[in-house]
Structures are given as C-alpha cells and as structure tokens.
C-alpha cells in the first residue's frame, strides 16, 4: 500500500545549516499494516510523514501509494487518499463550525460540491452513529462548535474525520503528545478501533516507546535519517523498552541508559 524507494531529503543544502533529514530510505507497507515509528529528535520521523503526505518534494527516490506513483503530486492532491492527524489538537478541524459541519466537510473532501443543504437528515443520522463509536457523548452534541471541545475530544473527532473516506493511508503524527496521559490512552484506544474497523494502513509517530510496542503490528526505529530497526510479528510482541535501547546502542554505536536519552537526542 505504501512504497518508498531510495528516498532522500536535505534541508538547506550547501549551507552551514545543512541537514540530511532522510538518507536513502526504503520502506514498504502491506495493506492493513499498522506501523509505529520511533527515534530521537531529528531522526527523520516527521520528515518521513511529511514526504509521504507531500508537504515538500523529496530530492531523490520515489513514493508510491497503492502502486500509484505520487512522488510529484502536491499535498492537496494526495489529501484525497491520505488521512492525517497532527500533534496539535487545534489542527485538522474548523473550530468555529459545528461538529456535524466538520464531519460533512470531511465526507465531501475531494468531491464536487453543489448548492444543496450543508448537512442532510440522513447524514446527521450517520454522523450520530459514527460519533457514538467514540464513547465520548459527542453524538448528542452535533450542533456544538468544535472550538468548545477538549483537546482529547478534538483529536478523537479528527481521527474520525480522517478515516471517513477510507483513505489508502492514515498518518498519525504524534497525535497524543499534547494530551494528558489518561486522555492520550483513550485516544490511542480509539485509534486502534478505527484502524482495525476500517482495515487502514497506518503510520504512527510516537515518542512513547511503550506505546510504540503496545500498538500496531510493526515497529521501525529511525536515526539520522535512516531506518535502523524494523521488527514485526512475534518479535515485536515480545519486545521491551530495554530491548529497544539495547538494539539502538548496538546499531547506532551509542550507549544509552534510559529511553528519555534516546528520545531527546
């Protein structure tokens, strides 16, 4: 469903601020793969997601989604088949519009729009049922403005919106980092449910190594713009945080004694 072939990206080339963010990255995701991505600051995690989303062009290599070459497509063209949830709960929704209006926008993404009613009765009933799945009571607040919701409620709503059109690929960019631990746990549970129910191919960046191990069927670790570890199946199920730290030390050639050191590089 996703194929990166020898993708490289350098920022500010030829200057004192040159940063090789991605270096010859090759990565393939099968349909339904839920891949968690970990690594220190500057490892290339967000650059990887932004390259897939089309936020900026890559310098070398190719990106294919469902066997279609999207390397040259701009971000707004890719949005028709890629869903994304950002770290900031304020991103991804229109705060001055109602819940049902936000859901209607998501349902119409990439489609022609006419002059009919913004939200029909049938759509309102559908949104009510979809929101009920979240278990947050939002199904009874369809006309409430999104800006009045909590951060966790907005992230849950954004997840629902991102998955409404069954995207070929779902990108979760540290989408629980700005939430308190209890809310983050709930949003991750909702993420698991939405991914599994819709059989979505998913890339999730996280700074929490326990979450990276607990969620998804595959885990990759990045360092200095490269994928240095790729584990899945039973091997991933039996991983511990200490295993990850030891493997990082062995591969990257650096000794670390806590996950905080690894994730704040």
Image (cartoon, rainbow, N blue to C red):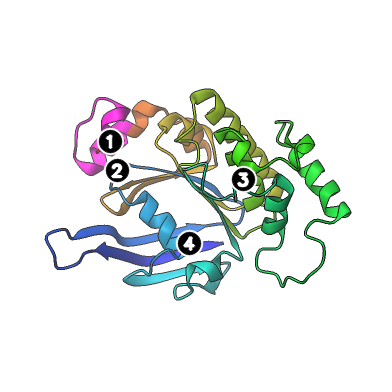
Q: Residues within 10 Å of mark 3 (few under 14, many from 20)?
A: many
- At 35% from the left and 33% from the top, the residue drawn is 244
Q: Magenta segment range?
A: 245-261
- In front here: 31 or 141? 141
Q: Determine which residue is flagged by label 1.
A: 264
Q: Are marks 3 and 2 in contact (CB under 8 Å)?
A: no
The residue tagged with tag 2: helix, strand or loop? loop
The label on residue 53 is 4
Left or right of residue 253, residue 7 in this image: right
Q: Residues within 10 Å of mark 2 (few under 14, many from 20)?
A: some
Q: Residue furthest left?
A: 16
The label on residue 159 is 3
In x, y percent, where is residue 140?
A: 79, 35
Query: Of marks 1 and 4, which one's residue comes earlier in the chain?
Result: 4
In x, y percent, where is residue 262?
A: 28, 34
Left or right of residue 48, residue 225 in this image: left
Q: Residues within 10 Å of mark 4 (few under 14, many from 20)?
A: many
Query: Disc 3 or disc 2, which is closer to the eye?
Result: 3
Q: Determine which residue is flagged by label 2.
A: 41
């Amino acid at each position: 469903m996703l194929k990166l072939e020898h993708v490289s990206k350098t920022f500010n080339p030829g200057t004192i601020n040159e940063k090789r963010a991605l270096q010859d990255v090759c990565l393939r995701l099968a349909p339904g793969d839920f891949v968690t991505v970990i690594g220190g600051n500057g490892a290339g995690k967000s650059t990887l997601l932004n390259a897939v989303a089309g936020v900026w062009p890559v310098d070398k290599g190719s990106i294919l989604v469902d066997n279609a070459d999207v390397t040259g497509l701009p971000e707004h063209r890719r949005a028709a088949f890629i869903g994304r949830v950002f770290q900031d709960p304020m991103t991804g929704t229109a705060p001055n519009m109602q819940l049902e209006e936000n859901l209607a926008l998501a349902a119409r993404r990439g489609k022609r729009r006419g002059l009919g009613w913004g939200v029909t009765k049938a759509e309102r009933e559908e949104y009510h049922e979809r929101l009920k799945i979240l278990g947050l009571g939002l199904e009874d607040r369809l006309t409430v403005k999104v800006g009045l919701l909590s951060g966790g409620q907005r992230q849950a709503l954004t997840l629902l919106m991102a998955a409404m059109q069954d995207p070929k690929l779902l990108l979760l960019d540290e989408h629980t980092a700005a939430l308190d631990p209890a809310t983050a746990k709930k949003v991750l549970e909702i993420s698991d449910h939405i991914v599994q129910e819709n059989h979505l191919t998913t890339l999730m960046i996280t700074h929490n190594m326990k979450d990276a191990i607990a969620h998804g069927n595959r885990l990759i670790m990045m360092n200095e713009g490269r994928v240095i570890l790729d584990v899945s199946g039973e091997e991933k199920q039996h991983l511990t945080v200490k295993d990850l730290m030891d493997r990082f030390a062995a591969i990257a050639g650096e000794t670390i004694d806590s996950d905080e050191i690894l994730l704040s590089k």
